[in-house]
Image: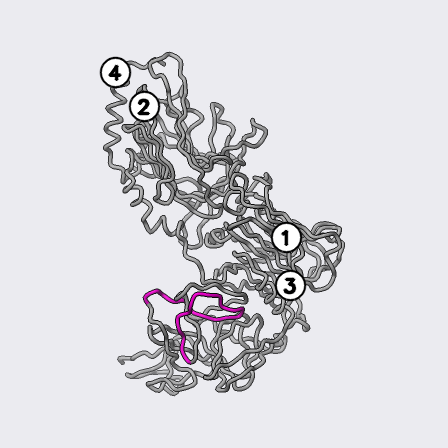
Amino acid sequence: MKKTLLSCMAMFACAGLMANAEVNQPVLSLSFDQNGLVVGGTDAASESHATRTMGTVMTFQNMLDGKWLGATEQNGVFAVKYDANDGVGQALQGSFTIEFLANVVTNAGRSYTPKESGESGTIKIFSTEQGGGWTIAKDRKDGLFFEIGFDKTPDDDVLKNEYYKVCDKFYNPTGRYYQYVAVYDQANHVLKLFCNGQLVASKETALEQIFVFPAIGETSREKGMDLFLGGDTGQDPTYIENGNRTVFVHANIYPGAMTDEEVAAQYNTTEVKAYTEMKTVGHTAMFIDAVFGKDGAVKNNTAFNQTLETAGTMVTQWNAEQMRYETVQDTANDQNFYYCDTYKDLRVTEMLADALSYEVYMKAGTATPAATMSPISMQQGGGFGVEFQKTGLVKFNFNTYGLRSLKGNAGNDGPHCSTPAGTLSTDYDHYVFVANRPGSLYSRIYKNGELLVENVSGNDPNVLGTHLPYTGYQWVAIGGDAKWKADHSTCDFPFQGNISIARAWGKALTEEDVTALYAQATSTSSVVTFNEYGLATVCLPFAAKLPEGVDAYIGYKDYGNAVFTMKVAKGGDVLPYGLPVLLAYGKTGDVTISAADLTVESALEISDYPNQLEGSFVTTQMAAGDAYVLSGNAFVKCEAGTLPAKAVWFNADVNDVDSKALENVVRPDPVGVKAVESAQKLEKDVYYDLEGRKVSNPGRGIYIKNGVKVFNAR
């Protein structure tokens, strides 16, 4: 295809127009709904933009904002077509800017290319390269890069493709969302790559020939070419190459080359930062805490508000020795288990980029199981999992499968660790499994508070990146292992035995944490020390029966320089499991608080009332001023340091006052508001007078409603 001088001049004219084009409006905008890809942008009305999928893809809703996200697999892509003469094709013949927001799930260097023995060293994330064009990709050696392919000799009869790449040793953790921007500045012969508004790499190409970009899509075609999310195809469009696992929020193509300032402005938006600078939930990092109840019931008692679901039929019973309910799995049945779809809460996958810990207190039905079994695991769904093998060997293993994956592994480098055969017993044992990435990748197995084995895998980013070498996606199973076919109909490695504690943490539990958790698992009481004002704060790992004379309060309302507390329980009442509370005793010294027998007593129901207090069963790191902690008879901003296990606090804002007085504890409220004796008597949206008596037809005056003073103007 010989190029004429006229056609080259036309391309220069088009390039000049595009270089000065308005870049704030995308010519093509790609997003998702429940049915797949949605096309928008200034060229959305073009009939050339048909969408399709190849292989395994899915869309799911982010539970935080309700937005639909698109997830690709190693063998699956989203694709949208374009023509050389439509708006997209014209934009790609001049300067242009590519922007997308995504979590690249696959570990660098593993991709799906059937015609190349199943794996390649490069994954292409957003691409139209193999037919001639551009790609944003990464590989094991170079990390992230932006590459263009173009016609080197436009005046020759023979096409000779040339590739120019801008890249750096740049690695992003899996599990986290980043905004990527690639700029093709035709006029200045510059390629640029940005991440989260910051320039990653820039390359100026000194070409003697005309720097044009005529190789749009397949060089032999001008119609029906493809842009791919999650891979690429070659001249044969029936298979995917360089496929990978990526979750996309959106992708945009803009005409013209964005300036560095415009790229920064694109990043500094609420929509983008909601993903790239995700807000954490408290400080505990615990995203699964399975609290079992009677008749197979289970509750996930964490601040992440993700539910635990039941597959099949689970059986529970009261363990009088431990004073908690436990699961009963007499046989290894792969249809009976609990599960949690962790991928729907992006705050969880954000944490799992760096660390994961499992805690389980369990009794195996046999020390030499007939097949591998697991008490808690997400291994086969992509991630770390627990294996109890037939010899009694205990293993902490992982698979880097993807979101809704085919059973194809994306790389097995890294931190497996296992104990000798015969470790498993039929006694109740406390296990903690830890995987950690920052600094140096390691994994550990603890049993009954003691470290059994550790595997340190080092910190080679060329092999493992700067993150855990697994996706952290899919779902977590309790009583088995998550299965790669994630329809929850069956699990892998079904468990045989009993489980009374099952937790998952998005951080690496320390040796101190493990010691504290083992002590808590094997105890049914806790000693609480009351200060000189007869006050204490505590978060107890059991449903606690209050001794006579001890009252419990929650932090109901923050008034700036004071905290209005609500009395929710008195001596003889049973506090719910894990509830952070302020205790008032009127005396100084130690008091033992014991677990309640939930077969004869019920814990108070107070979930309808907001509690400003937070707590953790393990040590919690706090920066100076991060939180308020009890000091004397007030809450004061904490110093930098570590709060002990079972500590209680409430979060602080940097602009808050340094201390907050307690209102409505021990002494009367300044205007005579008295605490209602029990949360069981405090009804929602009901008026009480200042003596705590219910008022059925309140007149004009001051009342208590939902725990705060209100003025009724009637």
Image height of 447 relative to 395, above or below: below
Q: How many labels does the image show?
A: 4
Rendered location of residue 551, percent (x, y) = 49, 82
* CA distance for labels 2 and 4: 14 Å
- Image point (54%, 62%), residue name: 300
Q: Do the residues labelled 1 and 4 touch (CB within 8 Å)?
A: no
Left or right, residue 588 beside residue 653: right
The label number, if any, that marks residue 6 in the structure image = 4
The kind of residue tagged 4 is: Leu
Mark 1 nearby-residue class (10 Å; few <14, some 14–19, many ≥20): some
Q: Indicate which label's residue lies in the foreground, 3 or 2.
A: 3
On-image quarter of the C terminus:
bottom left
The kind of residue tagged 2 is: Val
- Image point (73%, 56%), residue name: 423
Q: Mark 1 points at which residue?
A: 454
The kind of residue tagged 1 is: Glu
* CA distance for labels 1 and 4: 69 Å
Q: Give the range drawn in magenta.
A: 633-655
Mark 4 nearby-residue class (10 Å; few <14, some 14–19, many ≥20): few
